[in-house]
């Protein structure tokens, strides 16, 4: 209960940047417990579950708070602006997870890092093999977009059926991207070491920056879309529980959720274009 009660949705929306450090703390405690309490090959999933457990109460309270906004605010534009505060909260939380997982991967000894992130590494290898099979750019774009829409639907339905299901999908993605970023950072550090014979502060800073930017350029809009979809699913879930289907309040929440789903789809299309056409230019 201590971790779950550290911050309220109201405070988090006023100071969303604090969620970055909350995300680092939640995920770091999860890794620490997985290492020293659980161990074994299941650590990669235990880390995700423990991180999600710490976020559960915050996720539920945020959904309730956002539904309250739906019923109080009449203007759709103003309402979407207010939902943007919740989006900022979750984005900073995700960034905290990602940075934490990446740094843990970098600083843990090689074999231990491989064990801690074993399932994430398997997922990365699977994704890379699929990407290598994409021969043409249009096919690559459609494949990436279809995969992203699939994750969006998972976020939507998990959030609807399980309440904090969306945060599980997003924490898992943070762990995969974090491991991939950690791999990129370690490769960059190895290159610096081979050229200069030693890695100073500048080398670490450059490697970490390049590793993060490689995935964040298109990853931020993707994750934003997933959070928006998860928010829509949570709003629908709360509305179904609290209101009758022919109730005006229920219809208002459904209308708002529909707008959120549409916005998330548009953002995913933009993210897919960035991943296919922009990211390869720099990396």
Image: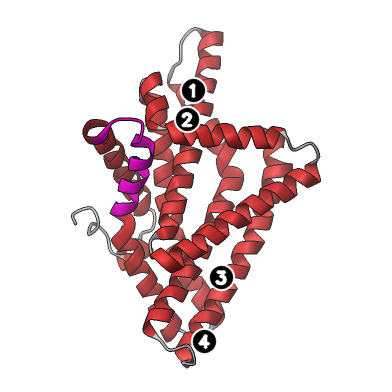
- Mark 4 is surrounded, within 10 Å at the Cα level, by few (under 14), some (14 to 19) or many (20 or more) other residues, namely some
- Mark 2 is surrounded, within 10 Å at the Cα level, by few (under 14), some (14 to 19) or many (20 or more) other residues, namely many
Q: Along the horizontal axis of the image, is 113 left or right of 281?
A: left
Q: What stretch is highlighted in magenta?
A: 38-54
- Residue pointed to by mark 3: 260
Quick one: which residue is furthest to the left in this view?
Answer: 2
Quick one: which residue is furthest to the front in this view?
Answer: 41
- Residue pointed to by mark 2: 182
Label 4 vs label 1, nearer the camera: 4
Magenta stretch contains residue 12: no
Q: Using the image, tell me which numbered label, if any, was put on residue 171.
A: none
Q: Position of residue 163 (x, y in %)?
A: 38, 65
Q: CA separation, marks 2 and 4?
A: 45 Å
Q: Which residue is depicted at the point 74% across and 38% down?
A: 134
Q: State which tag comes first along the sequence, 4 or 1.
A: 1
Q: Which residue is depicted at the point 62% across and 69% down?
A: 262
Q: Which of 7 and 198 is in front in this view?
A: 7
- Residue pointed to by mark 1: 186
Report the number of discs: 4
Q: Along the horizontal axis of the image, is 146 left or right of 91?
A: right
Q: State which tag comes first along the sequence, 2 or 4.
A: 2
Callout 1–callout 3 Cβ contact below 8 Å: no
Q: Where is residue 103 in the image (x, y as percent from the top left)?
A: 40, 32
Q: CA separation, marks 4 and 3?
A: 14 Å
User: Would residue 74 be visible to someone looking at this image?
Assistant: no
- Residue pointed to by mark 4: 251
Label 2 vs label 4, nearer the camera: 4
């Amino acid at each position: 209960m201590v971790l779950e009660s550290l911050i309220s949705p109201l405070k988090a929306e006023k100071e969303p940047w604090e969620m970055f450090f909350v995300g680092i703390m939640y995920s770091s405690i999860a890794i620490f417990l997985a290492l020293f309490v659980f161990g074994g090959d299941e650590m990669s999933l235990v880390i995700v579950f423990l991180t999600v457990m710490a976020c559960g109460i915050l996720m539920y309270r945020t959904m309730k708070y956002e539904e309250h906004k739906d019923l109080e605010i009449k203007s759709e534009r103003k309402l979407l602006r207010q939902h943007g505060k919740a989006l900022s909260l979750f984005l900073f939380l995700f960034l905290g997870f990602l940075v934490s997982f990446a740094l843990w991967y970098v600083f843990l000894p090689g074999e231990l890092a491989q064990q801690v992130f074993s399932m994430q590494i398997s997922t990365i290898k699977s994704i890379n093999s699929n990407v290598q099979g994409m021969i043409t750019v249009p096919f690559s774009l459609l494949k990436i977009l279809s995969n992203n829409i699939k994750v969006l639907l998972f976020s939507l339905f998990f959030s609807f059926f399980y309440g904090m299901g969306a945060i599980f999908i997003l924490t898992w993605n943070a762990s995969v991207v974090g491991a991939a970023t950690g791999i990129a950072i370690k490769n960059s550090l190895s290159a610096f070491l081979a050229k200069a014979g030693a890695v100073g502060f500048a080398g670490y800073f450059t490697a970490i920056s390049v590793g993060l930017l490689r995935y964040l350029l298109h990853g931020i809009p993707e994750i934003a879309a997933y959070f928006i979809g998860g928010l829509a699913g949570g709003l629908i879930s709360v509305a179904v529980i609290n209101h009758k289907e022919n109730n005006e309040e229920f219809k208002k929440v459904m209308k708002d959720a529909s707008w959120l789903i549409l916005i998330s789809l548009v953002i995913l299309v933009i993210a897919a274009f960035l991943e296919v056409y922009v990211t390869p230019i720099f990396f």
